[in-house]
Amino acid sequence: MPDISSRNVTVLGAGIVGICTALSLLEKGFVVELIDRDQPAEGASHGNAGVVSPWSSVPQSLPGLWRSIPKWVLDPEGPVALRWAYLPKFLPWAIKFLQAGNLDHLPAIGDAMNALNRPNVDLYRRHLNGTGHEDLLKDSLYVHVFRNPAGADLNQLGWRMRQERGVPLEVVNAGQLHEIEPALSPDYKAAVLIKDQARALDPGAVGKALFEKARGMGATFRQTATHRIVPSQDGGWILQTDDGELAVENLVVAAGAWSARLLEPLGIKVPLEAERGYHLVFRDPGITLNNSIMDTEGKFVTSSMLAGVRSAGTAEFSGLDTPPDYRRAKVFKRLTKRLFPDINVEDAEEWMGTRPSFPDSLPCIGEIPGQPNLFAAFGHSHYGFGMAPNTGRIVADIVSGHTPNMDLSPYRIDRF
Ligand SMILES: Cc1cc2nc3c(=O)[nH]c(=O)nc-3n(C[C@H](O)[C@H](O)[C@H](O)COP(=O)(O)OP(=O)(O)OC[C@H]3O[C@@H](n4cnc5c(N)ncnc54)[C@H](O)[C@@H]3O)c2cc1C
């Protein structure tokens, strides 16, 4: 049970998870400091695809996926890339990833994803309320498009998992699809729609708006890099930072893909992988999209945002420290043109961000066993923008000594 006699909480990492955690802690009356080496919401939370789905319940690893991996990895425009020098470090995680996709594990993973995501649109709307940035979140369909109409088959495993969890789905034919998204190429003959969700017009701006709200509620922000977390004699923690040593009482680690590196010296080893993704923003696209569009062949999402049309995706495994390979982003030029033939792709800006990915697509949330006053809130993989507000709410409950009314065992840090 956490020591709730102290009302001071430090949140390490001001990505969307740390910011939402800060907001929920502030709502409970805690005194909150956010720490980040960068400005808030500049990491993975800045450049993602902006999908906020209350329905995400299908993990990345599914049975039979391994059959597609060689083809994907060998195709320079494919959705998965691996730097071969990184293979020995990557293999143990990859094996755990494939094991997580075992049929026996999927129902529990699907339920745990669903439980984290389900209230996300409502929670974002509540958090954004009064910031003046309410319009950053728009109602949206999630349109999964297929050139071969046979692909839009609700009997496939992923769609069955969604249906079992009450996800509102509809299959539409070419005519209906082009009414919904007139800019789409006529080559696309069918789609599966996931209804009743939202999309962000600028995910980074959502994070920044919520950060300013947290500041308005009394949170402080310190911009400094943390190199090491060490236990202090008085039961709190000492952060060794660029600004020297900082003594903190309760510490939430929300440092995204860098969290495992910070925890390892404490003897906490977790299989957290840096799964890098890219985006390309077409700044003068000449077309507008009404929804989040998932290209089911290229495995990327395209959406109209404030800065233009953004295509985002790719899973690149090369560790935390290698420089970006922007060829991975430039691939989206051709792939986006295949979707939307009239789009102007000339004025494009690229970006790389690092997803914090566990093999089972679930994050770690909760107090870290054997480490009093140290809490985990990281590892949200492909779903962190959607999972962040509920993660924040759960962490704030736990820090304040309340057990949330849900099964937290799927998110335990010692589950691996
Ligand atoms: C291409 C792409 C598309 C995506 N699309 C979606 C989507 O549509 N919907 C969705 O739900 N999710 C999506 N995601 C996933 C989502 O973006 C992430 O899961 C989420 O942003 C993770 O948030 P975070 O706060 O944990 O991490 P981050 O945003 O990376 O924040 C971590 C913060 O910790 C700071 N930090 C780390 N180490 C230190 C240190 N030592 N000292 C100080 N500060 C430190 C970093 O500077 C950073 O600001 C996508 C991701 C990518 C890459």
Image: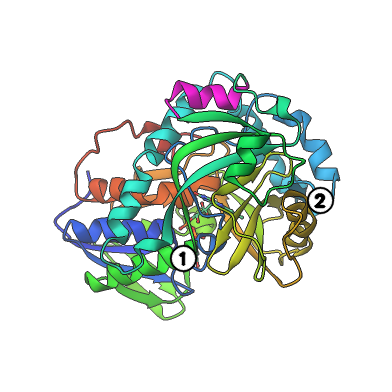
| Residue 170 point in image, percent of width and height | 53, 29
Q: Secondary structure at mark 2?
A: loop
As measured in the structure, the alpha-carbon distance from the residue carrying label 2 to the one carrying label 1 is 38 Å
Q: Nearer the viewer, residue 170 or 234?
A: 170
Residue range in magenta is: 156-167
Which residue lies under the disc numbered 2? 77
Q: Residue at x 32, y 47 (%)?
A: 122
| Residue 18 point in image, percent of width and height | 38, 59
Left or right of residue 79, residue 271 in this image: left
Question: Label 1 amino acid?
Answer: Arg
Q: Residue at x 79, y 62 (%)?
A: 327
Mark 2 closeness class: few <14, some 14–19, many ≥20 residues within 10 Å: some
The rendered magenta stretch, by its main secondary structure, is classed as: helix
Label 1 beta carbon within 8 A of ligand 1: no
Left or right of residue 337, residue 33 in this image: left
- Counting labels gives 2
Q: Secondary structure at mark 1?
A: strand
- Precedes in sequence: disc 2 or disc 1: 2
Which residue lies under the disc numbered 1? 228
Residue 72 higher or lower than 154, as above or below: below
Mark 1 closeness class: few <14, some 14–19, many ≥20 residues within 10 Å: some
